[in-house]
Structure formats: structure tokens, C-alpha cells
Amino acid sequence: MLALWDLQKSLPIAGALLIAALALGGCSSQLADYTPTDAQAHSRDSGGYLPVHDLPPDRDEAIIPPDQRAKIEAELAAARDRQAVAAKDAK
């Protein structure tokens, strides 16, 4: 009688798990189904690595002019000082 009681309790749970597995299995599909038909195939060339040792050409001019760089550095230093004062006041 005890085994029958366990079967009656576990049968609905097993059924629910089976239904959930079938429902989730229906949601899965092959990734190839999502590939557009006009997509180009990727080459599997193993020698297609980018040249790591090649460096870009040097630039003669600075990216940020020196006067703007000094202004930015001064603004950052002022912001750092304000944060340090605010942190001391918060303690």
C-alpha cells in the first residue's frame, strides 16, 4: 500500500516534467535555420591571423594639442581635489 501511495504522488510530478521537457524541446531549433540564404561562407584558412608584430606608422603630430592637454589635466586635477575634500567631509 505504501508503494502505491508513492506512485500516486510521483506520477503527476513525472508527467509535469515530461510535458515541460517536450515543450522546451520544441523551442529549440538548429542555428542553421536562422542563417540568411545570401550569407557568405567564412573561410577556414588557418593562416589568416592578423600580423601582431606590424606596428602602425608613427604620427608626427600630437593627437591632442599641448594647450588642450594642459587644460584637460588641470580640470582633472581640480576634480580630483574636490573629490578628496568631499571624501574628507563625508567621514
Image (cartoon, helix red, strand yellow):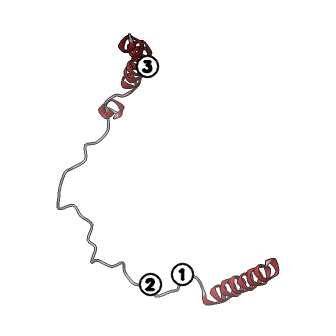
- First in sequence, mark 1 or 3: give its number: 3
| Residue at the spot 37% in from the left edge and 19% down from the top edge | 18
Q: CA distance from mark 2 to mark 3?
A: 70 Å
**Does residue 41 appear left or right of residue 21 in this picture?**
left
User: On the image, which quarter does residue 74 sit in?
Assistant: bottom right
Q: Quadrant of the C terminus?
A: bottom right
| Residue at the spot 63% in from the left edge and 86% down from the top edge | 69
Residue at the spot of label 1: 63
Q: Residue furthest right?
A: 89
Residue flagged by tag 3: what amino acid is it? Ile
Spot occupied by residue 65 in the image (x, y as percentages of width and height): 60, 86
Q: Mark 3: which secondary structure?
A: helix
Q: CA distance from mark 1 to mark 3?
A: 67 Å
Which numbered marker is on residue 59? 2
Residue flagged by tag 2: what amino acid is it? Arg
User: On the image, which quarter does residue 5 sit in?
Assistant: top left
